[in-house]
Image (tube, rainbow, N blue to C red):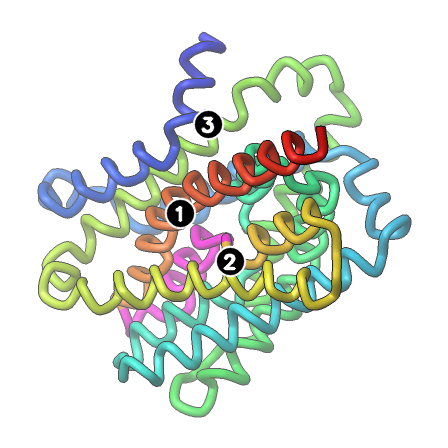
Amino acid sequence: MKRVCKLISDYMGLLVLLSAVVGLLTPGTFSGVKPSVINPMLGLVMFGMGMALRIDDFRIVFSRPRDVAIGCLAQFTVMPLLAWVLSRLFALDEALTVGVVLVGCCPGGTASNVITYLAKGDLALSVGMTATSTLLAPFVTPLLVWLLVGQTVDVEVAGMLLSIFWVVILPIVAGLAFKWLWPNASERATAYLPAFSSIAICVIVLIIIAANASKLLEGGLIIILVVVLHNLCGLSMGYLVGRLLRLPAAKRKAISIEVGMQNSGLASSLATLHFAAYPMATIPGAVFSVWHNISGAVVARLFARHADDDLRTVS
């Protein structure tokens, strides 16, 4: 069973891509599945994240506050501004603009920790940034969305804050509490959590793509291009921030990956809950979920190879 779970987590990018293709080609098969199931599924993923976290993961915030502050500041400035600029540059309509901005304003996703590990980056910094940006999200994400699109779209700041609390913060706290109360059971479950999270993300992507398949087929090329540029520019600018500040290579990799990889499932969830008048607002999050797992795997390979080359040079 553990071997199967490892295969699922190792090939998450491919599975997410297949889910998107299935949802796009056979949308009628999933017409009975309501988008409302996305929030409970995302909550379960966050519960698993809470179980996987350790107290040491939060200590980095106090032991290395400068590194975490740099990373989180880049997270909540680079991606939101890129989202706004790309939306204007490609003249996206209101719905797609909201979706792209939501992706940009969300915290880092849990997949970034796995990618940082594979890239031989600073894993402690990656986990610390994910935890910190997630805890800041209930306040920062709604405010950023309001600042960037609030002039043209009605943004429920208080409602989004509560949604992030219920879907993200509360499940993470519950996961931490479960780990503290039942450490043995939590330890046994941890081996299966990456596979469970991978399957949940695949289902979320499938539901969103299937629900908007016809519209995506009509104008999907432009949003795919915007999402790809958003992710690649985020990865590049995150790395550039670390380079300008002369941080070690491992830290540059962690910041690059944390900035470029978003909690796109949360973006789709918020779009479903608070922008029901704009159904296409869920699409950028779903496309981002597919793409950033593919680009993350490639970046991890490149970063890891570069690290191996550096080691051979030193020896």
Where is residue 247 shown, x and y percent of the image? Answer: 75, 56
Which residue is drawn at the image coordinates 43% and 26% (left, top)? 10
The circle drawn on residue 196 is 3
Query: Few, some or many C-alpha atoms within 10 Å of disc 2 (few <14, some 14-19, many ≥20)?
Result: many
Q: Amino acid at mark 2?
A: Leu
Query: Contact, CB < 8 Å: mark 3 with mark 1?
Result: no
Which residue is drawn at the image coordinates 34% and 62% (left, top)? 227
Image quarter where the N terminus lies is: top left
Front position in the image: 299 or 259: 299
**Which marked residue is nearer to the observer: mark 3 or mark 1?**
1
Q: Is 15 one of the magenta-colored residues? A: no
State whether residue 175 appears in this view: no
**Local secondary structure at mark 1:** helix
Q: Amino acid at mark 3?
A: Phe
Q: Quadrant of residue 11?
A: top left
Where is residue 231 shown, x and y percent of the image? Answer: 43, 59
Give the left or right position of residue 166, taking residue 181 as reference: left
- CA gap, disc 2 to disc 3? 26 Å
Which residue is drawn at the image coordinates 44% and 54% (left, top)? 264
Q: Quadrant of residue 218?
A: bottom left
State whether residue 265 appears in this view: yes
**Local secondary structure at mark 3:** helix
Using the image, determine if residue 309 lies above or below residue 157: above
Give the extent of the magenta segment: 261-278
Q: Tell me which secondary structure the magenta stretch mostly adopts.
A: helix
Residue at which label 1 appears? 295
Using the image, determine if residue 121 lies above or below residue 129: above
Query: Contact, CB < 8 Å: mark 2 with mark 1?
Result: yes
Using the image, determine if residue 36 lies above or below residue 75: above
